[in-house]
Amino acid sequence: MSIKLEHVNYIYSAGTAYEKHALKDVSLEILPGQFVGIIGHTGSGKSTLIQHLNGLVKASSGAIYYNGENIYADGYDMKGLRSQVGLVFQYPEHQLFEEDVLSDVCFGPKNQGLSKEECEKRAREALELVGFPEKQYHQSPFELSGGQKRRAAIAGVLAMRPKVLVLDEPTAGLDPAGRDDILDQVRYLHDQTGMTVVLVSHSMEDVARYVERIIVMNRGEKMLDGAVREVFSHYKELEQVGLAAPQVTYVMHDLQERGLPVETAATTVEEAAAEILRVLRHGKRSDT
Amino acid sequence: MIREITIGQYYPADSVIHRLDPRVKIVCTLLFLISLFVQNSLSGYVIATLFLVFVIRASKVPFRFIVKGLKAIILLLMFTVVMNLFLTKEGAVLLHFWIFTITENGLRISVFMAIRLIYLIIGSSLMTLTTTPNALTDGIESLLRPLNRFRVPVHEVAMIMSIALRFIPILLEETDKIMKAQIARGADLESGNMIQRTKAMVPILVPLFVSAFRRANDLALAMEARCYCGGEGRTKMKPLVYKRQDYAAYVIVVAYVVLAFVAGRFAPLHIWIF
Ligand SMILES: Nc1ncnc2c1ncn2[C@@H]1O[C@H](COP(=O)(O)OP(=O)(O)OP(=O)(O)O)[C@@H](O)[C@H]1O
Ligand SMILES: [Mg+2]
């Protein structure tokens, strides 16, 4: 289930006055079972990048391999690819259209050619996974709140049982509780089923808490790519391109500068607290 | 995908033509189009060609953008040429085979017709390429203002036009996004027969309509929140005022029209049958 991009370039509206080189020579590989975060400033090419992962847009140059097969080869089964790589878009209102939520979620499995019962079974499963209240299954998707629409939209993709789940800013417009809820569910899915997850986000805190690897995009180029700690250790460079490491990274560096011998690698509040406590306790013990 | 479609596409650049008052561009384009159709001589078309080349150079729009507009009329163009070529019966016969006859007159008329159509498209594309849709509607509103006296709601019509123009690219972009979102869920838009394909459009049209209505609603609210209440007593932040360059443009275009007319009348320049 690995996805491999080699020297991918993408140009919007090539040959017009509005030409825009949105991806510049991007190479990367997403391995099976990874939980990858993609961060970057607005307009840095994150959405464009992930639309390549299931062949929705065709790279202007470069190659993409899914499980070692070139997806641009003649006769490649694009439809098959799209049911293996599920993509949830940034704005859920772009995909809800049915009379009620349940049938909307059934749309994906129906396109996979499954029987009606099977579709409904999968749809219920998916809705349950994203924590959508059962009493609203038969409500019109247009009457839902923003957060509920988003859950329905995510369920619509999960119902296809993809091997790779790509989420484009799934938490935009959600309250903190709803945000943690959805991300916790995604992590649960990842841990339970070994599903590969690619999460696009603006929020460093989110990314730091959930993912194991971060890809930083800047003006269409891949700027950094590595384990969470490693990427955040470049926090000065991140700042230069308008991004910031999580708050705790700053706190830890400040503490270290002021003489508290903490390790600066912590990326979440919990880790930081543990580290500070460790150092403080250790200090006390050495006093007595 | 669908974004590639261009309608009345504006080409951003900084040129004399771009800076002209939209009223000047509208009136001059009309004058140019009329001059094309009263023209019937080789010398007139030579002058029109020189004039067009001059304006295109001044506009700084690359030539390939200008000819893009021609693609849309290529069928009409061929049809007109073929019809004129074979159906004109007057004049000396040039060529005769089987049931087809081509006469001198037929050739002449079809060539002139083709030139007219091509220049017509180039002329009007030049106007839309160098004028933003908003400036264009401003210009139209200002030119049509005298009709207010006959109770024509000029301002409202212009407002509707500018909103419609503004929404075209937004809706195209929206359609593109919706199509992608549904294709990602396995929607199949290409294969199948007519009925299946029409059915496949539903998942695209429903969100599109919903979003169009939502946008219209939002826009109405936003306009009301800023106390918009029609054209009455409304002033403009940037009223259209003629500047020196605008008068100069009028003079140049009128000079061209007169020159082309006089040349056609008194020095028609006959070469072979043209
Ligand atoms: N359909 C399009 N046509 C032309 N240019 C586009 C199109 N979509 C995106 N772009 C341009 O490509 C660049 C990358 O856009 P993209 O949507 O990938 O950014 P992003 O990183 O997802 O931003 P955001 O965080 O705001 O979602 C931007 O500069 C944008 O203006
Ligand atoms: Mg985006």
Image (spheres, rainbow, N blue to C red):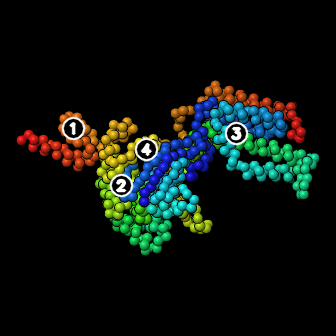
Give the residue pinned by disc 2.
Answer: A35
Give the residue pinned by disc 3.
Answer: B123
**On the same chain: label 3 and label 4?**
no
Task: Identify the amino acid type marked 1.
Answer: Leu
Task: Identify the amino acid type marked 3.
Answer: Gly
Judging from the image, mark 3 belongs to the subunit labelled B
C-alpha separation, residue under disc 3 versus residue under disc 4: 45 Å
The residue most toward the front is: A68
Query: Is the CB atom of the residue marked by disc 4 within 8 angstroms of ligand 1's nearest atom?
Result: no
Task: Identify the amino acid type marked 4.
Answer: Lys
Q: Of B245 and A194, which appears nearest the observer?
A: A194
Q: Of B222 and A185, which appears nearest the observer?
A: A185
The residue most toward the right is: B92
C-alpha separation, residue under disc 2 versus residue under disc 1: 30 Å
Secondary structure of the residue carrying tag 2 is strand
Q: Is residue A131 left or right of residue A270?
A: right
Residue A167: percent from left, percent from top = 40, 55
Q: Are marks 4 and 1 in contact (CB under 8 Å)?
A: no
Give the residue pinned by disc 1.
Answer: A255
C-alpha separation, residue under disc 4 versus residue under disc 1: 31 Å
Q: Are marks 3 and 4 in contact (CB under 8 Å)?
A: no
Residue visible at 77% across and 42% down? B116
For the C terminus of chain B, the quadrant is top right
Residue B147: percent from left, percent from top = 64, 41
Label placed on residue A222: 4
Which is closer to the viewer, label 1 or label 3? 1
Q: Are marks 2 and 4 in contact (CB under 8 Å)?
A: no
